[in-house]
Amino acid sequence: MVLAAAGDGWLWWDWVFRHIESSPVSLSILDSLREHVVLTVLSVVIGQAIALPMAVMAHRAPRLETTVLGVFGLIYTVPSLALFAFLVPVTGLSRTSALIGLTAYNLLVLVRNDLTGLAGVAPDVLDAADGLGLGRARRLATVELPLALPAIVAGLRVATVSTVALVPITALIGQGGFGQFIARGLQDLFKTPLVVGIACSIVLALVADLALVAAERAVTPWARVREGR
């Protein structure tokens, strides 16, 4: 059936409709969507949970900035196939391996944008906060982080879109979301699953980016007023 369909062009709609919902013997678009979203959200959330404290420390101790960015930059240069090959003997063909790899590639982008946001807070605003008697923790939570949000969200947008693009690579270790369709298409030389995997990944990246733009507008109304939007 696959060989017959392979000659029918790039998209065989009957195949698509039969693979929308779960089936014990075939791929499912909805299951792959769920897995793709879960891997993306978890890796970005974990990445930000690591990146933000590191950025705060580097911002307060500038000597750490070069070291932090250097370490995360080195991780970012490691080829994904090599990283997963290193992780599999330790954590196996599991979601844990996928999350470690995906999170590692997020850290440089997230830390850099978090640092940019914190560094962009005007000194006179910090002086005013100190004059009001705010401690360092309270000043960070109520002044610095809110003002740094546009840069932080920009980092989240880049990290999210890049993660959506990277998730298919984890199909090599049995994860991958829509990457499983791409792998199936390449394995069977069948264009339809390849098109489905690529198209769904692109649409998911666009939707995620638009959702984060909307979230940024909702949580930073002062930035919108300042820019006249």
Image (spheres, rainbow, N blue to C red):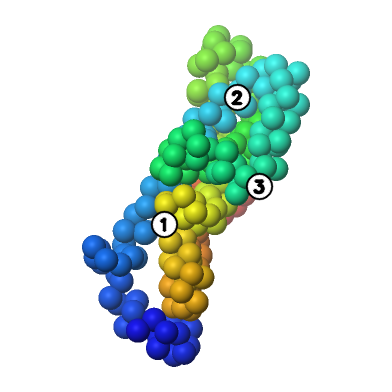
Q: Secondary structure at mark 2?
A: helix
In this view of the protein, which residue sits in the foreground, 81 or 131?
81
The three-letter code of the residue at mark 2 reads Met
* Residue in the image at 43% along x and 44% along y: 93
* Residue in the image at 66% along x and 47% along y: 79
Q: Position of residue 38 (x, y in %)?
A: 38, 47
Judged left or right of residue 78, residue 104 is left
Nearer mark to the viewer, of 2 and 3: 3
Numbered circle sitting on residue 79: 3
Q: Are marks 1 and 3 in contact (CB under 8 Å)?
A: no
Q: CA distance from mark 2 to mark 3?
A: 24 Å
Numbered circle sitting on residue 149: none
Q: Secondary structure at mark 1?
A: loop
The three-letter code of the residue at mark 3 reads Pro
In the picture, residue 63 is in which quadrant?
top right
The three-letter code of the residue at mark 1 reads Gly
Q: Residues within 10 Å of mark 1 (few under 14, many from 20)?
A: many
Q: Secondary structure at mark 3?
A: loop
Judged left or right of residue 81, residue 17 is left
Task: Point out the image quarter for the C terminus.
Answer: bottom right
Numbered circle sitting on residue 177: 1
- How many numbered markers are drawn? 3
Q: Is residue 223 above or below residue 65?
A: below
Q: Earlier in the sequence, mark 2 or mark 3?
A: 2
